Image (cartoon, coloured by chain):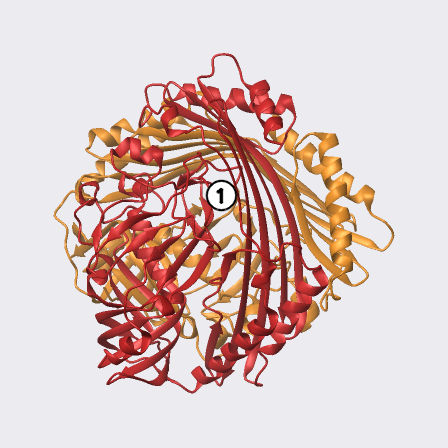
Chain colours: A red, B orange
Amino acid sequence: MTMDLRRLLESALPAGVEWAALRRVRSVERSYAAKDGAFESAALYEDEGFMIEVLSGGQFGYAGLAAAGPAAMAAAAARALELARSASGRSIHRFGTEVRPATALSYETPRGRRAAPGADLLAGGAVALSRAMRVSDKIVQASAEISTRDLETEYVSTSGAAICQRTHIVCYGCAAVAREGSTIQKRTLNGPRGRTRQGGYELLDFPRIEAEAARAAEQAIELLGARDCPSMRADLVLAPDQMMLQIHESIGHPLELDRILGDERNYAGATFVRLEDIGSLRYGSELMNVSFDPTVAGEAASYGADDIGAPARKELVIKDGILVRALGSLESQARSGKAGVANQRAEGWHRSPIDRMANLNVEPGKDALPDIIASVERGVWMEANRSWSIDDYRNKFQFGCEYGKLIEDGELTRTVRNPNYRGVSSSFWRSLYKVGDASTFQVFGTPNCGKGEPNQVITTGHASPVCAFRGVEIFGGEQ
Amino acid sequence: MSAMRDLEETFKGACAALFDELSGGEELSVGFSGESSDFLRFNRGKVRQIGHVDGASLRFKYYRGGRSLASGFEATGEAEADRRKAAMALEAARREAALLPPDPYQVLPKAAASSREEFPGRLPDPGRLPQEILGPGQALEAAGAEFVGIHAQGPICRGAATSAGARHWFAAESFIADYSAYLPNGKALKSCYAGREWDGGEYARRLASEASRLEALGRPERAVPPGEYRAYIAPEALAEFIDFFSWYGLSERQIREGESAFISLKEGRTSLSPRFDLVQDFSLGVEPRFNESGEVAPERLRLIAGGKLASTLVSARSERQYGLPANAAPEEEFLRSAAIGAGELDEDRALEALGTGLYLSNLHYLNWSDVDSARVTGMTRFACFWVEGGRIVSPIKDLRFDDSLYRVFGDRLEALTARRSLVVNPSTYEERALGGSLLPGILLSGLTFTL
């Protein structure tokens, strides 16, 4: 297959091209949804296309197309070259082939069960999950969705790159909405799409998930009778399914090197982090260690190489609370002179790769969960994200969770609903005072991180232990 | 024009291939999104990325024997390849659907009408985009600002067809230059030049005019403490609220399922300001009236009238499930072509009417903070100012607001401007978007800021 792609590339190129590459992306997505114990919908989408990229005078130009015929490919190559040449003298940086390494490798998601169950079993599984959540007449909606994505990416270049990657993503979610009078509460399994992982069908352990779904529905009922989260400045203990969001928004995006370089200012925003901060900024307390690691088996954004051929490797980006490295691709590294990571990734064949998070994880610490809870005199435990908002410099944030429990004198006490907190990234992480041990560490992911112009969504993974923060502004909902 | 022709031929060819393959008892509805787009992304007045994308996405829903399946594939524009893809997609749909449980609220395609709208445009030469787009940006750079953003152009097409006979086609050649100008102090103004007829002179005049507005942003920043302030929300900022009428919004299904912030409005427990009207208004002409099932929405649908709920968005599926008449909403029941009614405030006197408070040109990253009480949080962004005595005093340090839509569009809604602006949808997720909203500026007697 790779040899065919190489022939296709070589036959498409106009004379005089310095360097070119061809990326083929094929995805197959399936989804099955159920509601209130009945089948709701199913979908099966296939998508396949190509992106040809050429280098001319230090500027890359690209063309994305679905057609695989030689004439269409040659026209696309000519268009990409014309556009690259049109930027002559106006490029933000004069790039060379050093930012397109000649990597040769293959990668495939490790899987336990490879053979897809039939649509009847997957649809039936979704129905059973939604039925399991009907634990009370107060449940006004019980929904479940199972989706899978098989993604195949091949990449060849005139300088010898030959990469073939096959990733398999399984995502499932359950949501129970409970109502009593005018009070409505919703509970999910770790947030709307938190259970996004790479792997095989062993991830769909239906008896276990049904039990978890029923528990979520019972908690939605429990929340109806709970008091609103009090407004106070107190300690905050975050479960890993909320740490996912906290990491994503207030570590991941601020550390993207293209944001630091200003590329995203017109859309997603910039960052409070400056180039000169890399290597010296105290980002968080000395307990804070954060890794960029696309090599974790089973985490949502694992790969062998990014979409320009940079081989994947684990890198610490925050060490003992100090920012040591930003999330910058080979292109951003060339522009900034700073070290980075292998993270130039594209949504699909129709988008050009940009700096992205992959798996971005908080490393486990030394504290057992009982010790963390015992350390809190007055605070709130929060889990499962339901609301997220942060400013365009990735500083002032406000996040909300589905479920909370008061912590009083070292013990978990009453359940509280509508738990929210707000803070400022640049000081929040410095208030981190407990980091859970490996027994509290959990892996989550999201399939829909948005960024870039033109816009792109991409899958990211986030794993974390339970973490505790001092003196956070906490508040509830409004009736 | 030839790219639009090619896309229409691709749509027709793929539809014909699908419908020709149908057997007895099978039905289909087909939706199509196509584009042939040039993209120029720039930063500091220089080219960051430049490229072209041809896309032709077919999405169809397959029906047989009480079972339904959504499916689709990317068409290539090569006739034989697309016939092969269509046949394979249909075969896969047959196999998959046969294994599914019956669809309890299946609605077979009924729409049989046809329509055709085409809006050719005049666009810059793709081979000269860097000069055409970045050249006039020197006016901003001369004023000390960095010019950053994206220009996208080319035809965008939508189509729908059903086995019941519907055939709809909508195509427009358009451009959008979506940009901002950043001063060294981190303050910026945001703007957009969009349309179907590119006028390089008009574009250059806009940039020059915006350069003259940078002076106020260069003044020392004011850190406004959290609290409640009078506020003027400009149309571009108000556009950020429009999604909240779709997301946990005015969908009949979401209201029935307990997932809407407007349940209390529906149940008559609350109301909005009598000044507030919201209409789905396709007379804006920025997107087609047909949905993915070929159903044609009324040109105008009053959703909120005088602060009271007039209608919800009802799909054919909800009609089947809940027994109330559909209004050709898409299956996801989201709002299209929104228009908020005008008021009487002279836009030129908005600062005077504001008196002392906050002028908000843009907002950022809004989200529900409490759906139950319709509370939304978000950030100020770009050119937002502290105003005293009807005069701009200084740009503000970014502020977070957190307040209920029942106040923003309710008892705090003091006035709406008489003039409204068409704010186009700049989204390029998956594809270049169509659509936009016709919006006034609104004056609030109070908006709560928390951080």
Looking at the image, residue B332 sits to the left or right of residue B350; the answer is right
The residue under label 1 is A347
Looking at the image, residue A241 sits to the left or right of residue B292; the answer is left
Image coordinates for residue A143, horizontal then vertical, percent = 58, 70
Looking at the image, residue A457 sits to the left or right of residue A204; the answer is left
Residue B447 visible here: no
Image coordinates for residue B36, horizontal then vertical, percent = 55, 32
Which residue appears farthest toward the left when viewing the image? B220
Image coordinates for residue A462, horizontal then vertical, percent = 40, 57
Query: Is residue A399 or residue B238 the one in the foreground?
Result: A399
The mark total stands at 1
Q: Quadrant of residue A102?
A: top left
Say what secondary structure mark 1 lies in.
loop
Looking at the image, residue B397 sits to the left or right of residue A438; the answer is left
Query: Is residue B444 or residue B153 the one in the foreground?
Result: B153
Amino acid, disc 1: Glu
Q: Residue at x 40, y 52 (%)?
A: A359
Q: Residue at x 63, y 52 (%)?
A: B291
